[in-house]
Image (cartoon, grey):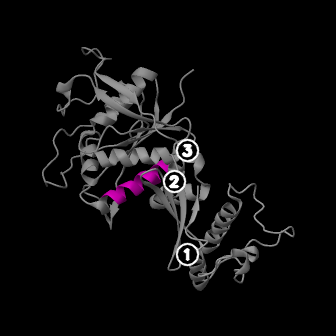
Amino acid sequence: MPAPPYNLLIAAGQSPQVITETVFELNRAEGLQPAAVHVVTTRVGHAYGRAQLLGEPQDDPSRGTAIPGVENRWRTFCEDVLERTGNGEGPPVELSFHVPKVGTEGLDDIHQQGDDTRFANLCYELVETLTQEEESLIGSIAGGRKTMSAHLMTAFSVYGRPDDRLTHVLLSDPSLEGDHSFFYPEQGSPRYGQLLNLVDIRFPRLRTVLSDDLLESRDLEGILDFLEPHVASARTVDTVRLELRTGKATLVVEGDDETLGTCALSPKKAATLVTFAEQRADMGEPVPGTALTYDSEASPIAQQRHLQPPGCVAARSCRLPPLPDREQLSRPGVLRLAGRCSSPGGGRRVFR
C-alpha cells in the first residue's frame, strides 16, 4: 500500500537544488510522494527558482543580470523521478513560492531586523495554514540563510503535529556543494543512492500547550511571550517574586543565579497572588488547597485581606480597610496595594 502524500515546506535561497534534492531523497529512501511543494524564500530566491526549476527567464533582482541555467527541471524531475505526469500546462506536482511582502514588493533579502520579522511571520503563517491540511507536513531547513531555517524550525515547534517532520538533506560528496548543475542524482549514475542523505531533526512540540485562539492568531511575539513562563517552569526555580511599582505588577521567576522569566499581571491577578504570599507567611508553609479565605464564612478573598501599615508592630492590631472585591482594580488601587506590600511585616512578597 503506497504511503499517503505529504506537503513539503522548504526554506530556499539562491540554490533551488535543495528542493529537488529533498523531494528526491524522500522518494528514494521512503517512497513518499508530495501532494504539493511550498517554498518560503526571498524575491531573489523566487527568481532563481522560477528560472532554474520552471524554465522561466529571470533577472537577478539584486544584480540586474540574467540568471543562468534556465531550464524546466521540475517537470522533468516529476516525470522521471516521481513518475508523475501533469494535466495540461501545469507541472505534475504543484510548486509554490512564498515571499514576505514589503509594501507591494517582495522582500529582496534579509538585511535587518524588520526583514527578519517579516520572514518569521510568514513562516508562522504558512506552518499554521499547512498544519490544518489533511496531509502531514514535512519541513526542510536545507536552504536559505541561517535565520530562515531558524524561524522555520521555531514555527514547527509551535504548530507541529505528531506526524509532522523536520528534515535536512546532506551531500555526501563535498565537490557537489558548489556545482550549480547538480539538482539530483540521475538514474544509473555512479553512487546513485549514496550521494544524498536525509536527516530527521527532532524538535520540541509545543502545540498542546497553546490555546486554539493563540495558535490561530499567528502572533509570533504573543506566542513566545506565552511560552516563556512554561519554559522557565521546566528549569530549577528558586524564587517567584511579585513586584508592584507605580501601578505595574510583574511576576519575576528566578533560579539560583539568573532570572528565568518575567510576566506582567493584571491588578486582580496581582492581588490574588499577594493573598497567596500572605497566607504563606502566616502559615509558615505552602498554602493548602485553594480555600483562600480567613474565616469560615468563605467571604470573598479581597474583603478578607489584612495588611500591616508602616510603623505598626502588631499585624492584627493595625488592620487596614479591605481592598474592593471587583473585576479590575483601579490604578490608585494598585498603588495602595504596592504601598501595603512594602510595609514592615509584609515586606517583599516572595514565594519559595
Q: Residues within 10 Å of mark 2 (few under 14, many from 20)?
A: some
Position of 145 with respect to 25 (left or right) is: left
Say whether residue 130 is magenta: yes
Residue lying farthest to the right in this orientation: 297
Q: Give, as a single range, the part of the protein colored magenta.
A: 116-133
Q: Residues within 10 Å of mark 3 (few under 14, many from 20)?
A: few
Between marks 2 and 3 in the image, the one whose residue lies nearer the viewer? 2
Residue lying farthest to the front in this orientation: 313
What's the mark number on residue 133?
Answer: 3
What's the residue at 75%, 58% (across, down)?
290
What's the mark number on residue 227?
Answer: 2
Task: Give me the C-alpha separation between circle 1 and circle 3.
Answer: 54 Å
Viewer-closest of 46 and 302: 302
What's the residue at 34%, 24% (across, down)?
197
Q: Secondary structure at mark 1?
A: loop
Position of 132 with respect to 37 (left or right) is: right
Numbered label tally = 3
Viewer-closest of 281 and 179: 281
Residue receiving disc 1: 342
Tell me whether circle 1 and circle 3 mark residues in contact (CB < 8 Å): no
Judge whether 172 appears above or below 65 on screen: above
Task: Tell me where residue 6 appears, x and y as whole percent.
Answer: 49, 35
Task: Give me the C-alpha separation between circle 2 and circle 1.
Answer: 30 Å
Q: Main secondary structure of the magenta part?
A: helix
Judge whether 101 appears above or below 20 on screen: below
